[in-house]
Each structure stands twice: as structure tokens, then as C-alpha cells.
């Protein structure tokens, strides 16, 4: 799960466009973006992905749109 703490001027259209750019770039880094959540008011964005490493997630964001996450938290799915 990666977190962007404050994206200035965040809109639904902008986060959707960034997510689509991530989807286009993800295969080059072995990442699969699963879902995202956002809050326009605070500028926060949360992205859930499957990836070989936290760095791979950051590389996708960097290559896709330059909005690199402020934090990446590695999580495991419970049963």
C-alpha cells in the first residue's frame, strides 16, 4: 500500500488519469496495481498493488507521472 500524503489540486479526473498511467507502466517493473482510494479535500491518495518490492512501486509512479508516493507500507492479506 502506498500513500501520497498531499497532492496539491487533486481531482477525481487527475487521480484517474494518474492511475491509468500507472497501469500502462506497471508491467515494465513487475507491478500490478489493484485499487486506489483518494480524498480530494486532503489531497491524500492510497494505492494498493502487488509488487516485488517497494522500490518497484516507486519506479512505476516515477515513470508514469512523477507523483512518487511519500510512504510505502508492505502488507499481507489475511484469510
Image (cartoon, rainbow, N blue to C red):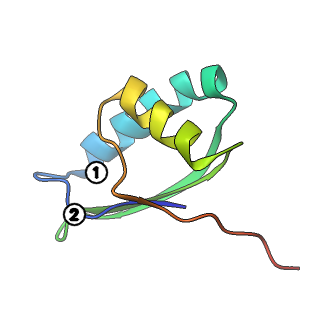
Query: For residue 37, which quarter of the picture?
Result: bottom left
Return the x and y of residue 22 as percentages of the image width and height: 48, 33
Helix, strand or loop status at disc 2: loop
Please determine whether, in this image, residue 44 is positioned above or below residue 60.
Answer: below
Q: Residues within 10 Å of mark 2 (few under 14, many from 20)?
A: some
Q: Residues within 10 Å of mark 1 (few under 14, many from 20)?
A: few
Q: Residue furthest bottom?
A: 79
- 39 relative position to 28: left or right: left
Return the x and y of residue 6 as percentages of the image width and height: 20, 61
- 76 relative position to 63: left or right: right
Q: Determine the residue positioned at 32% across, 46% down.
A: 15
Q: Determine the residue positioned at 29% across, 32% down.
A: 66
Earlier residue among tags 2 and 1: 1
Q: Determine the residue positioned at 55% across, 61% down.
A: 1
Which quadrant of the rendered structure holds the C terminus?
bottom right
- Work out whether residue 37 or residue 77 is closer to the camera in this orientation and state it: 77
Q: Determine the residue positioned at 11% across, 53% down.
A: 8
Q: Contact (CB < 8 A) between labels 2 and 1?
A: yes
In the picture of the structure, the residue carrying the numbered disc 2 is 40
Helix, strand or loop status at disc 1: helix
Query: For residue 39, which quarter of the picture?
Result: bottom left
- Per the model, the C-alpha gap separating discs 2 and 1 is 7 Å
In the picture of the structure, the residue carrying the numbered disc 1 is 12
Please determine whether, in this image, residue 13 is positioned above or below residue 79.
Answer: above
Q: Residue furthest left?
A: 9
Amino acid at each position: 500500500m502506498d500513500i501520497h500524503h498531499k497532492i496539491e489540486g487533486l481531482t477525481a479526473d487527475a487521480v484517474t488519469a494518474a492511475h491509468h498511467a500507472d497501469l500502462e507502466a506497471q508491467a515494465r517493473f513487475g507491478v500490478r496495481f489493484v485499487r486506489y482510494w483518494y480524498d480530494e479535500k486532503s489531497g491524500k491518495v492510497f494505492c494498493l498493488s502487488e509488487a516485488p518490492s517497494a522500490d518497484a512501486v516507486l519506479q512505476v509512479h516515477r515513470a508514469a507521472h512523477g507523483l512518487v508516493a511519500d510512504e510505502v507500507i508492505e502488507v499481507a492479506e489475511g484469510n
